[in-house]
Image (cartoon, rainbow, N blue to C red):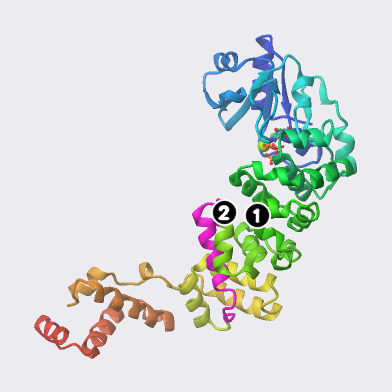
Amino acid sequence: MELNQEALSIIETLESAGFEAYAVGGCVRDSLLGLVPKDIDITTSARPEQVKALFPRTFDTGIEHGTVTVLMRNGGYEVTTFRTDGKYTDHRRPDHVEYALSLEDDLSRRDFTINAMAYHPEKGIIDLFGGREDLRRGVIRCVGRAEERFTEDALRMLRAIRFSARLGFVIDEEASQAISHLAPTLTYVSRERVWEELKKTLISPHPDYLERMIGLGLGPYVDPAFAKTELLELKGLPELAEDLNVRTALMLYRFGEAEAGRILRRLKTDNETRHQVCLLIAHIQEKPASSGKEARQLMRQVGREEARRLGDLQYGAHLITKEEYTLQSEFLCSEMSAPVTLKELAVTGRDLIEAGGEQGPSLGVHLSWLLDQVIDDPAKNNRETLIALFRQHWYNCNDSLAKAALEDNQ
Ligand code: ATP
Ligand code: MG
Protein backbone atom coordinates (compact mmCIF):
# COMPACT_ATOMS: atom_id res chain seq x y z
CA MET A 1 0.00 0.00 0.00
CA GLU A 2 1.19 3.50 -0.75
CA LEU A 3 0.26 6.75 0.92
CA ASN A 4 0.50 10.15 -0.67
CA GLN A 5 3.20 12.56 0.44
CA GLU A 6 0.82 14.66 2.51
CA ALA A 7 -0.50 11.73 4.56
CA LEU A 8 3.05 10.47 5.03
CA SER A 9 4.18 13.85 6.23
CA ILE A 10 1.30 14.07 8.76
CA ILE A 11 2.25 10.66 10.15
CA GLU A 12 5.90 11.66 10.26
CA THR A 13 5.19 14.92 12.07
CA LEU A 14 3.09 13.13 14.69
CA GLU A 15 5.72 10.45 15.18
CA SER A 16 8.60 12.90 15.43
CA ALA A 17 6.66 14.50 18.29
CA GLY A 18 6.59 11.13 20.05
CA PHE A 19 3.07 9.95 19.10
CA GLU A 20 1.88 6.93 17.15
CA ALA A 21 0.02 7.52 13.88
CA TYR A 22 -1.49 5.30 11.19
CA ALA A 23 -3.68 5.55 8.13
CA VAL A 24 -6.87 3.70 8.99
CA GLY A 25 -10.26 2.42 7.86
CA GLY A 26 -11.67 2.99 4.38
CA CYS A 27 -8.38 4.05 2.78
CA VAL A 28 -6.63 0.83 3.81
CA ARG A 29 -9.59 -1.25 2.61
CA ASP A 30 -9.81 0.54 -0.73
CA SER A 31 -6.06 0.48 -1.37
CA LEU A 32 -5.95 -3.27 -0.73
CA LEU A 33 -8.75 -3.65 -3.24
CA GLY A 34 -6.76 -1.68 -5.79
CA LEU A 35 -9.23 1.22 -5.64
CA VAL A 36 -8.24 4.84 -5.18
CA PRO A 37 -9.26 5.83 -1.64
CA LYS A 38 -11.66 8.78 -1.44
CA ASP A 39 -9.85 10.24 1.53
CA ILE A 40 -7.16 9.20 3.97
CA ASP A 41 -8.08 9.13 7.64
CA ILE A 42 -5.41 9.05 10.29
CA THR A 43 -5.62 7.63 13.78
CA THR A 44 -3.16 8.73 16.42
CA SER A 45 -2.26 8.53 20.08
CA ALA A 46 -2.02 12.34 20.13
CA ARG A 47 -4.92 14.23 21.71
CA PRO A 48 -6.74 16.82 19.59
CA GLU A 49 -4.96 19.76 21.31
CA GLN A 50 -1.64 18.09 20.65
CA VAL A 51 -2.54 17.55 16.98
CA LYS A 52 -3.55 21.19 16.67
CA ALA A 53 -0.28 22.34 18.19
CA LEU A 54 1.72 20.43 15.60
CA PHE A 55 0.09 21.72 12.40
CA PRO A 56 -0.32 25.32 11.32
CA ARG A 57 -3.70 24.87 9.65
CA THR A 58 -6.36 22.76 11.37
CA PHE A 59 -10.03 23.00 12.20
CA ASP A 60 -12.28 21.13 14.60
CA THR A 61 -14.42 18.62 12.75
CA GLY A 62 -15.82 16.47 15.48
CA ILE A 63 -13.86 17.53 18.48
CA GLU A 64 -16.26 15.60 20.76
CA HIS A 65 -15.17 12.45 18.91
CA GLY A 66 -11.53 13.47 18.97
CA THR A 67 -11.37 14.48 15.30
CA VAL A 68 -9.36 17.41 13.96
CA THR A 69 -8.98 18.16 10.26
CA VAL A 70 -5.44 18.98 9.23
CA LEU A 71 -5.33 21.12 6.11
CA MET A 72 -2.59 20.38 3.64
CA ARG A 73 -2.00 21.90 0.23
CA ASN A 74 -4.26 19.44 -1.63
CA GLY A 75 -7.00 18.96 0.93
CA GLY A 76 -7.93 18.04 4.47
CA TYR A 77 -7.08 14.94 6.46
CA GLU A 78 -9.17 13.83 9.41
CA VAL A 79 -6.90 13.01 12.30
CA THR A 80 -8.69 11.20 15.14
CA THR A 81 -7.32 10.29 18.52
CA PHE A 82 -7.36 6.56 19.39
CA ARG A 83 -10.66 6.02 21.11
CA THR A 84 -13.04 3.45 22.42
CA ASP A 85 -16.73 4.03 22.56
CA GLY A 86 -18.36 4.15 25.97
CA LYS A 87 -21.62 2.37 26.69
CA TYR A 88 -24.40 2.59 24.09
CA THR A 89 -27.87 3.04 25.49
CA ASP A 90 -29.73 4.48 22.49
CA HIS A 91 -28.76 2.00 19.75
CA ARG A 92 -26.99 4.75 17.87
CA ARG A 93 -24.37 6.76 19.67
CA PRO A 94 -22.04 5.96 22.52
CA ASP A 95 -23.04 7.83 25.68
CA HIS A 96 -19.53 9.20 25.70
CA VAL A 97 -16.28 8.67 23.87
CA GLU A 98 -13.14 7.70 25.72
CA TYR A 99 -9.65 8.11 24.45
CA ALA A 100 -7.84 4.81 24.20
CA LEU A 101 -4.22 4.03 24.78
CA SER A 102 -3.62 1.58 21.99
CA LEU A 103 -4.26 1.16 18.30
CA GLU A 104 -5.78 -2.21 19.10
CA ASP A 105 -8.52 -0.63 21.21
CA ASP A 106 -9.22 1.84 18.44
CA LEU A 107 -9.47 -0.85 15.78
CA SER A 108 -11.76 -3.01 17.86
CA ARG A 109 -14.45 -0.30 18.09
CA ARG A 110 -14.74 -0.23 14.29
CA ASP A 111 -17.67 -1.92 12.59
CA PHE A 112 -16.41 -4.49 10.09
CA THR A 113 -13.15 -6.39 9.76
CA ILE A 114 -12.51 -4.86 6.35
CA ASN A 115 -12.84 -1.38 7.89
CA ALA A 116 -10.67 -2.16 10.90
CA MET A 117 -7.21 -2.24 9.39
CA ALA A 118 -4.45 0.30 9.79
CA TYR A 119 -1.34 1.03 7.78
CA HIS A 120 2.01 2.37 8.82
CA PRO A 121 4.73 3.27 6.32
CA GLU A 122 7.31 1.14 8.17
CA LYS A 123 5.23 -1.43 10.05
CA GLY A 124 2.99 -2.17 7.06
CA ILE A 125 -0.64 -3.34 7.36
CA ILE A 126 -1.98 -3.98 10.84
CA ASP A 127 -4.82 -6.43 10.53
CA LEU A 128 -5.93 -7.79 13.88
CA PHE A 129 -9.31 -9.22 12.88
CA GLY A 130 -8.75 -10.96 9.58
CA GLY A 131 -9.81 -8.04 7.40
CA ARG A 132 -7.51 -9.00 4.55
CA GLU A 133 -8.86 -12.51 4.47
CA ASP A 134 -12.43 -11.17 4.44
CA LEU A 135 -11.52 -8.84 1.58
CA ARG A 136 -10.15 -11.81 -0.30
CA ARG A 137 -13.26 -13.90 0.40
CA GLY A 138 -15.62 -11.01 -0.24
CA VAL A 139 -17.30 -11.02 3.16
CA ILE A 140 -18.71 -8.32 5.41
CA ARG A 141 -18.09 -9.54 8.95
CA CYS A 142 -18.37 -7.64 12.22
CA VAL A 143 -15.44 -7.00 14.50
CA GLY A 144 -16.49 -9.08 17.53
CA ARG A 145 -20.01 -10.44 18.07
CA ALA A 146 -22.43 -9.19 15.47
CA GLU A 147 -25.38 -9.12 17.84
CA GLU A 148 -23.47 -6.90 20.24
CA ARG A 149 -22.14 -4.56 17.58
CA PHE A 150 -25.54 -4.01 15.95
CA THR A 151 -27.16 -3.57 19.34
CA GLU A 152 -24.65 -0.81 20.12
CA ASP A 153 -25.31 1.00 16.87
CA ALA A 154 -28.23 0.03 14.66
CA LEU A 155 -26.94 2.13 11.76
CA ARG A 156 -24.26 -0.52 11.25
CA MET A 157 -26.95 -2.85 9.84
CA LEU A 158 -27.45 -0.48 6.94
CA ARG A 159 -23.71 0.07 6.64
CA ALA A 160 -23.37 -3.69 6.18
CA ILE A 161 -25.81 -3.53 3.28
CA ARG A 162 -24.10 -0.46 1.85
CA PHE A 163 -20.60 -1.97 1.90
CA SER A 164 -21.86 -5.26 0.50
CA ALA A 165 -23.50 -3.35 -2.38
CA ARG A 166 -20.47 -1.16 -2.96
CA LEU A 167 -18.06 -4.09 -3.07
CA GLY A 168 -20.26 -6.94 -4.28
CA PHE A 169 -19.64 -8.80 -1.01
CA VAL A 170 -21.85 -11.15 0.99
CA ILE A 171 -22.81 -10.44 4.58
CA ASP A 172 -21.63 -13.30 6.74
CA GLU A 173 -24.09 -15.65 8.39
CA GLU A 174 -23.66 -14.38 11.94
CA ALA A 175 -24.16 -10.76 10.87
CA SER A 176 -27.16 -11.67 8.70
CA GLN A 177 -28.86 -13.46 11.57
CA ALA A 178 -28.18 -10.59 13.92
CA ILE A 179 -29.66 -8.13 11.42
CA SER A 180 -32.81 -10.24 10.99
CA HIS A 181 -33.19 -10.27 14.72
CA LEU A 182 -32.40 -6.61 15.42
CA ALA A 183 -34.02 -5.00 12.36
CA PRO A 184 -36.70 -3.17 14.45
CA THR A 185 -33.97 -1.25 16.30
CA LEU A 186 -33.37 0.71 13.09
CA THR A 187 -36.22 2.94 14.27
CA TYR A 188 -33.74 4.46 16.76
CA VAL A 189 -31.67 5.83 13.89
CA SER A 190 -32.43 9.29 12.48
CA ARG A 191 -34.06 9.24 9.06
CA GLU A 192 -31.28 11.48 7.69
CA ARG A 193 -28.73 8.78 8.48
CA VAL A 194 -30.99 6.09 7.07
CA TRP A 195 -31.34 8.04 3.82
CA GLU A 196 -27.59 8.65 3.73
CA GLU A 197 -26.98 4.89 3.71
CA LEU A 198 -29.85 4.17 1.35
CA LYS A 199 -28.49 6.80 -1.03
CA LYS A 200 -24.99 5.30 -1.00
CA THR A 201 -26.45 1.85 -1.61
CA LEU A 202 -28.58 3.17 -4.48
CA ILE A 203 -25.61 4.67 -6.30
CA SER A 204 -23.34 1.70 -5.65
CA PRO A 205 -22.44 -0.85 -8.33
CA HIS A 206 -25.05 -3.24 -6.83
CA PRO A 207 -28.14 -1.20 -5.97
CA ASP A 208 -30.25 -4.34 -6.33
CA TYR A 209 -28.65 -5.54 -3.07
CA LEU A 210 -31.40 -3.48 -1.49
CA GLU A 211 -33.28 -6.73 -1.92
CA ARG A 212 -31.01 -8.12 0.79
CA MET A 213 -32.01 -5.28 3.00
CA ILE A 214 -35.63 -6.27 2.43
CA GLY A 215 -34.80 -9.97 2.76
CA LEU A 216 -33.20 -9.39 6.14
CA GLY A 217 -36.36 -7.64 7.33
CA LEU A 218 -35.00 -4.07 7.46
CA GLY A 219 -37.49 -2.71 4.88
CA PRO A 220 -40.38 -1.63 7.11
CA TYR A 221 -37.94 0.08 9.51
CA VAL A 222 -36.34 2.05 6.69
CA ASP A 223 -39.82 3.29 5.80
CA PRO A 224 -43.29 1.72 6.04
CA ALA A 225 -43.53 1.92 2.23
CA PHE A 226 -40.67 -0.56 1.94
CA ALA A 227 -42.96 -3.21 3.37
CA LYS A 228 -44.96 -3.01 0.12
CA THR A 229 -42.35 -4.96 -1.77
CA GLU A 230 -44.66 -5.48 -4.75
CA LEU A 231 -44.43 -1.74 -5.46
CA LEU A 232 -40.67 -1.42 -5.07
CA GLU A 233 -38.69 -1.76 -8.27
CA LEU A 234 -35.18 -2.96 -7.41
CA LYS A 235 -34.23 -5.48 -10.07
CA GLY A 236 -33.93 -2.92 -12.91
CA LEU A 237 -31.66 -0.60 -10.89
CA PRO A 238 -28.21 -1.88 -11.92
CA GLU A 239 -28.98 -1.26 -15.60
CA LEU A 240 -29.33 2.46 -14.93
CA ALA A 241 -26.44 4.91 -14.87
CA GLU A 242 -25.21 5.72 -11.35
CA ASP A 243 -27.58 8.64 -11.01
CA LEU A 244 -29.28 9.01 -7.66
CA ASN A 245 -32.40 10.75 -8.94
CA VAL A 246 -33.10 8.29 -11.73
CA ARG A 247 -32.46 5.29 -9.51
CA THR A 248 -34.62 6.67 -6.71
CA ALA A 249 -37.37 7.44 -9.21
CA LEU A 250 -37.23 3.93 -10.61
CA MET A 251 -37.33 2.39 -7.15
CA LEU A 252 -40.43 4.40 -6.20
CA TYR A 253 -42.32 5.12 -9.41
CA ARG A 254 -45.00 2.51 -8.85
CA PHE A 255 -46.10 4.34 -5.72
CA GLY A 256 -46.98 7.35 -7.89
CA GLU A 257 -45.73 10.90 -7.60
CA ALA A 258 -47.63 11.94 -4.47
CA GLU A 259 -46.78 8.88 -2.39
CA ALA A 260 -43.15 8.92 -3.56
CA GLY A 261 -43.00 12.53 -2.37
CA ARG A 262 -44.35 11.52 1.03
CA ILE A 263 -41.83 8.69 1.33
CA LEU A 264 -38.92 11.01 0.50
CA ARG A 265 -40.24 13.60 2.92
CA ARG A 266 -40.33 11.00 5.67
CA LEU A 267 -36.77 10.03 4.79
CA LYS A 268 -35.85 13.71 5.11
CA THR A 269 -34.11 13.90 1.76
CA ASP A 270 -33.16 17.37 0.61
CA ASN A 271 -35.88 19.24 -1.26
CA GLU A 272 -33.95 19.30 -4.52
CA THR A 273 -33.76 15.49 -4.66
CA ARG A 274 -37.42 15.14 -3.73
CA HIS A 275 -38.57 17.63 -6.35
CA GLN A 276 -36.49 16.09 -9.10
CA VAL A 277 -37.53 12.53 -8.31
CA CYS A 278 -41.19 13.57 -8.20
CA LEU A 279 -40.84 15.46 -11.48
CA LEU A 280 -39.41 12.35 -13.14
CA ILE A 281 -42.17 10.15 -11.77
CA ALA A 282 -44.84 12.67 -12.81
CA HIS A 283 -43.64 12.50 -16.42
CA ILE A 284 -42.86 8.82 -16.63
CA GLN A 285 -45.79 8.14 -18.99
CA GLU A 286 -44.68 10.87 -21.42
CA LYS A 287 -44.49 9.75 -25.02
CA PRO A 288 -40.85 9.44 -26.08
CA ALA A 289 -39.63 12.22 -28.37
CA SER A 290 -39.28 11.08 -31.97
CA SER A 291 -38.40 14.36 -33.65
CA GLY A 292 -36.28 17.40 -32.94
CA LYS A 293 -39.37 19.40 -32.13
CA GLU A 294 -40.68 16.83 -29.65
CA ALA A 295 -37.24 16.72 -28.03
CA ARG A 296 -37.30 20.52 -27.64
CA GLN A 297 -40.84 20.38 -26.25
CA LEU A 298 -39.78 17.78 -23.72
CA MET A 299 -36.75 19.81 -22.66
CA ARG A 300 -38.93 22.86 -22.28
CA GLN A 301 -41.36 20.92 -20.13
CA VAL A 302 -38.96 19.17 -17.76
CA GLY A 303 -35.53 20.72 -18.35
CA ARG A 304 -32.54 19.55 -20.38
CA GLU A 305 -30.89 17.24 -17.87
CA GLU A 306 -34.20 15.89 -16.67
CA ALA A 307 -35.29 15.02 -20.20
CA ARG A 308 -32.23 12.80 -20.52
CA ARG A 309 -32.85 11.31 -17.09
CA LEU A 310 -36.51 10.75 -17.94
CA GLY A 311 -35.47 8.67 -20.95
CA ASP A 312 -33.18 6.58 -18.75
CA LEU A 313 -35.99 6.10 -16.27
CA GLN A 314 -38.58 5.15 -18.90
CA TYR A 315 -36.19 2.69 -20.44
CA GLY A 316 -35.22 1.26 -17.04
CA ALA A 317 -38.91 0.83 -16.24
CA HIS A 318 -39.43 -0.91 -19.61
CA LEU A 319 -41.97 1.71 -20.63
CA ILE A 320 -40.17 2.52 -23.87
CA THR A 321 -38.25 0.26 -26.23
CA LYS A 322 -34.54 0.33 -26.88
CA GLU A 323 -35.23 1.88 -30.30
CA GLU A 324 -37.43 4.61 -28.83
CA TYR A 325 -34.83 5.28 -26.17
CA THR A 326 -31.99 5.55 -28.68
CA LEU A 327 -33.97 7.77 -31.01
CA GLN A 328 -35.01 10.09 -28.19
CA SER A 329 -31.43 10.26 -26.89
CA GLU A 330 -30.18 11.21 -30.35
CA PHE A 331 -32.73 13.98 -30.72
CA LEU A 332 -32.06 15.27 -27.20
CA CYS A 333 -28.39 15.31 -28.02
CA SER A 334 -28.73 17.09 -31.37
CA GLU A 335 -31.13 19.66 -29.86
CA MET A 336 -29.06 20.20 -26.73
CA SER A 337 -28.12 23.76 -27.66
CA ALA A 338 -31.55 24.74 -29.02
CA PRO A 339 -33.27 27.49 -27.01
CA VAL A 340 -35.84 25.92 -24.69
CA THR A 341 -36.21 28.39 -21.82
CA LEU A 342 -37.49 31.96 -21.58
CA LYS A 343 -33.99 33.02 -20.58
CA GLU A 344 -32.63 31.73 -23.86
CA LEU A 345 -35.00 33.77 -26.01
CA ALA A 346 -33.27 36.41 -28.11
CA VAL A 347 -35.56 39.02 -26.56
CA THR A 348 -36.32 40.00 -22.98
CA GLY A 349 -39.39 41.56 -21.40
CA ARG A 350 -37.61 44.90 -21.62
CA ASP A 351 -37.22 44.47 -25.39
CA LEU A 352 -40.94 43.87 -25.70
CA ILE A 353 -41.72 47.00 -23.68
CA GLU A 354 -39.43 48.99 -25.92
CA ALA A 355 -41.30 47.53 -28.89
CA GLY A 356 -44.57 48.81 -27.50
CA GLY A 357 -45.52 46.13 -25.01
CA GLU A 358 -46.93 46.90 -21.60
CA GLN A 359 -45.44 46.07 -18.25
CA GLY A 360 -47.58 43.50 -16.44
CA PRO A 361 -48.64 39.86 -16.53
CA SER A 362 -49.43 39.94 -20.26
CA LEU A 363 -45.71 40.36 -20.92
CA GLY A 364 -45.04 36.88 -19.56
CA VAL A 365 -47.80 35.46 -21.72
CA HIS A 366 -46.25 37.05 -24.81
CA LEU A 367 -42.78 35.78 -23.95
CA SER A 368 -44.14 32.30 -23.45
CA TRP A 369 -45.95 32.51 -26.80
CA LEU A 370 -42.69 33.58 -28.44
CA LEU A 371 -40.95 30.60 -26.88
CA ASP A 372 -43.63 28.35 -28.41
CA GLN A 373 -42.71 29.80 -31.82
CA VAL A 374 -39.01 29.22 -31.19
CA ILE A 375 -39.63 25.64 -30.04
CA ASP A 376 -41.47 25.12 -33.32
CA ASP A 377 -38.64 26.69 -35.28
CA PRO A 378 -35.38 27.59 -33.52
CA ALA A 379 -34.32 29.67 -36.54
CA LYS A 380 -36.81 32.29 -35.34
CA ASN A 381 -34.73 32.97 -32.26
CA ASN A 382 -33.29 36.32 -33.30
CA ARG A 383 -34.27 39.73 -32.06
CA GLU A 384 -35.65 41.08 -35.29
CA THR A 385 -37.89 38.10 -36.06
CA LEU A 386 -39.17 37.88 -32.50
CA ILE A 387 -39.99 41.58 -32.26
CA ALA A 388 -41.86 41.35 -35.57
CA LEU A 389 -43.71 38.25 -34.37
CA PHE A 390 -44.55 39.97 -31.12
CA ARG A 391 -45.99 43.04 -32.86
CA GLN A 392 -48.09 40.90 -35.11
CA HIS A 393 -49.25 38.67 -32.27
CA TRP A 394 -50.14 41.56 -30.09
CA TYR A 395 -51.94 43.27 -32.90
CA ASN A 396 -53.89 40.12 -33.57
CA CYS A 397 -54.79 39.77 -29.94
CA ASN A 398 -58.31 40.94 -29.58
CA ASP A 399 -57.38 43.87 -27.47
CA SER A 400 -58.35 47.29 -28.66
CA LEU A 401 -56.36 49.07 -25.99
CA ALA A 402 -53.31 47.16 -27.05
CA LYS A 403 -53.92 48.05 -30.66
CA ALA A 404 -54.29 51.70 -29.80
CA ALA A 405 -51.08 51.61 -27.84
CA LEU A 406 -49.26 49.95 -30.68
CA GLU A 407 -50.54 52.48 -33.19
CA ASP A 408 -49.53 55.33 -30.91
CA ASN A 409 -46.10 53.89 -30.70
CA GLN A 410 -45.52 53.53 -34.38
P1 ATP B 1 -16.33 5.65 2.57
O1 ATP B 1 -15.35 5.47 1.48
O2 ATP B 1 -17.72 5.36 2.19
O3 ATP B 1 -16.18 6.96 3.30
P2 ATP B 1 -15.27 4.58 5.01
O4 ATP B 1 -14.81 3.22 5.40
O5 ATP B 1 -14.28 5.68 5.04
O6 ATP B 1 -15.97 4.47 3.60
P3 ATP B 1 -16.79 6.12 6.86
O7 ATP B 1 -18.24 6.08 7.15
O8 ATP B 1 -16.19 7.35 6.33
O9 ATP B 1 -16.48 4.87 5.94
O10 ATP B 1 -16.06 5.75 8.23
C1 ATP B 1 -14.66 5.71 8.41
C2 ATP B 1 -14.27 4.54 9.30
O11 ATP B 1 -14.80 4.75 10.61
C3 ATP B 1 -14.81 3.20 8.84
O12 ATP B 1 -13.94 2.57 7.92
C4 ATP B 1 -14.93 2.44 10.14
O13 ATP B 1 -13.67 1.93 10.53
C5 ATP B 1 -15.30 3.52 11.14
N1 ATP B 1 -16.76 3.68 11.32
C6 ATP B 1 -17.57 4.57 10.71
N2 ATP B 1 -18.83 4.49 11.13
C7 ATP B 1 -18.84 3.53 12.05
C8 ATP B 1 -19.86 2.97 12.88
N3 ATP B 1 -21.12 3.39 12.79
N4 ATP B 1 -19.50 1.98 13.73
C9 ATP B 1 -18.22 1.58 13.82
N5 ATP B 1 -17.22 2.04 13.06
C10 ATP B 1 -17.51 3.01 12.19
MG1 MG C 1 -14.76 7.84 4.73
Magenta residue span: 265-289
Quadrant position of residue 70 = top right
SS for dot 1: loop
Left of 301 or right of it: where is 23?
A: right
Q: Earlier in the sequence, mark 1 or mark 2?
A: 1
* Residue ID for mark 1: 223
Residue 184 within the magenta-colored segment of the rendering: no
Residue at 67% from the left image edge and 19% from the top image edge = 98
Q: Residue 184: x, y in percent?
A: 72, 46
SS for dot 2: helix
Q: Amino acid at mark 2?
A: Arg
Q: Quadrant of ligand 2?
A: top right
Circle count = 2
Residue at 74% from the left image edge and 54% from the top image edge = 205
Dot 1 and dot 2 residues touching (CB under 8 Å): yes
Q: CA distance from mark 1 to mark 2?
A: 8 Å
Q: Residue 374: x, y in percent?
A: 39, 79
Q: Which mark is residue 266?
A: 2
